[in-house]
Amino acid sequence: MSSLFSVMRAVAAEPETQSSRLGNASIPRRIWQSTIRSDVGVLAPIALTSILLRTLVNGQYGFHRDELLTYTNARHLDWGYVPYPPITAVLARIELELFGPSLRGFRFFGAVAQSLMMLCAGLSARELGGKRAAPPSARSKRLHWSLECSF
């Protein structure tokens, strides 16, 4: 992430030339190329693939009893619930409005949250001094743990 900001600062600090006055198309290309080469460029496709796979596979076993409770509470919103805070029911209500009563739609935000956690784990590993292989390794550890908890 920091490499993206350093490229943006370098682009902003460049002196104005005739090509930049005319709408230089190479600036977005340089930012795009630096993002692809960065850790985000490595981790983001993996996270997106995880979201896609979880969304495709999540409709197999039916609703769990906790999901049925959340589904019921999403239909009857209140300021507080015993098992969880009100934001859980609000997010479930948003899922219910967007996707209807489908199981895949009801589990979509959970898949997105797990993929974001994989992305954060990989970026944290890099920030803590890991080499180039550290972010994908941390991501795979997070993926393995989340798959064990999911099934």
Image (cartoon, helix red, strand yellow):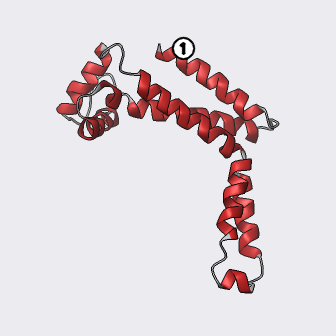
State the residue in front, 94 or 87: 94
Rendered position, 21 above or below 151 = below
Residue 122 percent across, percent down from the top left = 67, 35
Observer able to see residue 5: yes
Q: Amino acid at mark 1?
A: Glu
Q: At 47% from the left edge and 17% from the top edge, which residue is drawn?
A: 150
Picture mark count: 1
Q: At 67% from the left edge and 76% from the top edge, which residue is drawn?
A: 24
Which residue carries the number 1 mark?
Answer: 148
Location of residue 76 by image quarter: top left
Residue 39 percent across, percent down from the top left = 71, 43
Looking at the image, residue 84 sits to the left or right of residue 151; the answer is: left
Rendered position, 145 above or below 112 = above
Rendered position, 18 above or below 4 = below
- Circle 1: is it few (<14), some (14-19), or many (20+) Cα within 10 Å? few
State the residue in front, 68 or 45: 45
Rendered position, 122 above or below 83 = below
Looking at the image, residue 108 sits to the left or right of residue 11; the answer is: left
Q: At 30% from the left edge and 17% from the top edge, which residue is drawn?
A: 63
Residue 94 percent across, percent down from the top left = 29, 40
State the residue in front, 96 or 53: 53
Residue farthest toward the left in the current orientation of the protein: 76
Residue 135 percent across, percent down from the top left = 72, 34
Q: At 74% from the left edge and 54% from the top edge, which residue is drawn?
A: 3
Observer able to see residue 114: no
Q: Secondary structure at mark 1?
A: helix
Looking at the image, residue 49 sits to the left or right of residue 29; the answer is: left
Location of residue 8 by image quarter: bottom right
Location of residue 129 by image quarter: top right
